[in-house]
């Protein structure tokens, strides 16, 4: 089955760190750009970061620059998001998404909730 | 950064209605626009990409049009399963942004 499964969310204090993982299966992970998208409770969607197939190019939204790092391991068919210096406005469901050939998000995971609170 | 503005924010309609949702980009994005449907507690699902290409498996009552800065999602005859929130999304130079969403409610 073609799917993405996120893990690693939870409750973390402001200023803390968390590492999200996304396990891909059912498709050739190494041939796709991948992305993280988040959604704060009751709010809209926000793109967070992208990574190229070989990890050589990475892009992210300004609000997470210097704090979040996207990475991948094709041997493990996995995508990661290292989140440091977390703030309250980082509280959200974080989705892993596959980027299709025409640059849209054609496959999504079910998401993992990150709550930043003391 | 490219900002995406959707209208309306909320839309009330009945089963069988034809509805249109608009999306405006703050600068030209060519045809690099997608539409997503999201239901409560679920991940988004792509409906349309490249402004007017229907994703495989999506019913033909969904259609998209536009280019440059003005785009439209049309549902030709609303079905009960279509009541959800819809987002437009642009792609430009390896970054993305979404509209704020349009909640489609039952009248």
Image (tube, rainbow, N blue to C red):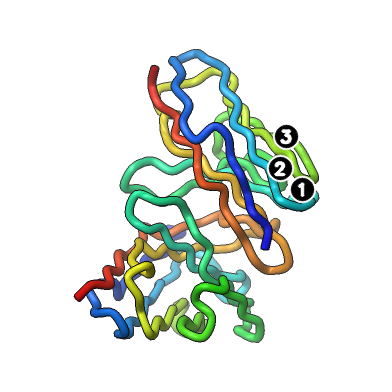
Label 2 chain ID: B
Which label is found at residue B90? none
Category of crowding for the residue at label 1, using alpha-carbon neighbours closer than 10 angstroms: few (below 14), some (14–19), many (at least 20): some
Q: Earlier in the sequence, mark 3 or mark 2?
A: 2
Q: Nearer the viewer, residue A61 or B17?
A: A61
Quarter of the image where the N terminus of chain B is located: bottom right
Seen at 54% across and 72% down, the residue is A49
Residue B43 coordinates in the image, percent (x, y): 41, 51
- In the depicted structure, whether residue B45 falls above or below residue A87: above
Where's residue A71, x and y in %? 51, 83
Would you place residue B27 above or below residue A75 in this image? above
A40 lies left or right of A27: left
Q: Quadrant of residue B84?
A: top left
Mark-to-mark CA distance, 2 and 1? 5 Å
Disc 2, SS: loop
Q: Nearer the viewer, residue B54 or A65?
A: A65
Q: Residue at x 72, y 61 (%)?
A: B92
Residue labelled with disc 2: B51
């Amino acid at each position: 089955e073609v799917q993405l499964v996120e893990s690693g969310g939870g409750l973390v204090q402001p200023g803390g760190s968390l590492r999200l993982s996304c396990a891909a299966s059912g498709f050739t992970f190494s041939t796709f750009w991948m992305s993280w998208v988040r959604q704060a409770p009751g709010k809209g969607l926000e793109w967070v970061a992208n990574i190229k197939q070989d990890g050589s190019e990475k892009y992210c939204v300004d609000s997470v620059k210097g704090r979040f790092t996207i990475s991948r391991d094709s041997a493990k068919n996995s995508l990661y998001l290292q989140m440091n210096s977390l703030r309250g406005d980082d509280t959200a469901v974080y989705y892993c998404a596959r980027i299709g050939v025409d640059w849209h998000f054609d496959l999504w995971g079910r998401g993992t909730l990150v709550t930043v609170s003391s | 950064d490219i900002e995406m503005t959707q209208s309306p924010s909320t839309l009330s309609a009945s089963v069988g209605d034809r509805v249109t949702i608009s999306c405006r980009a703050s600068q030209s994005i060519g045809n690099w626009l997608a539409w997503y449907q999201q239901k409560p507690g679920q991940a988004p699902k792509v409906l349309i990409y490249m402004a007017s290409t229907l994703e495989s498996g999506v019913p033909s009552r969904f259609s998209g049009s536009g280019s440059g800065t003005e785009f439209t999602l049309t549902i030709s005859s609303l079905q009960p399963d279509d009541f959800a929130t819809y987002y437009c999304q642009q792609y430009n130079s390896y970054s993305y942004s979404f509209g704020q969403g349009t909640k489609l409610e039952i009248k």
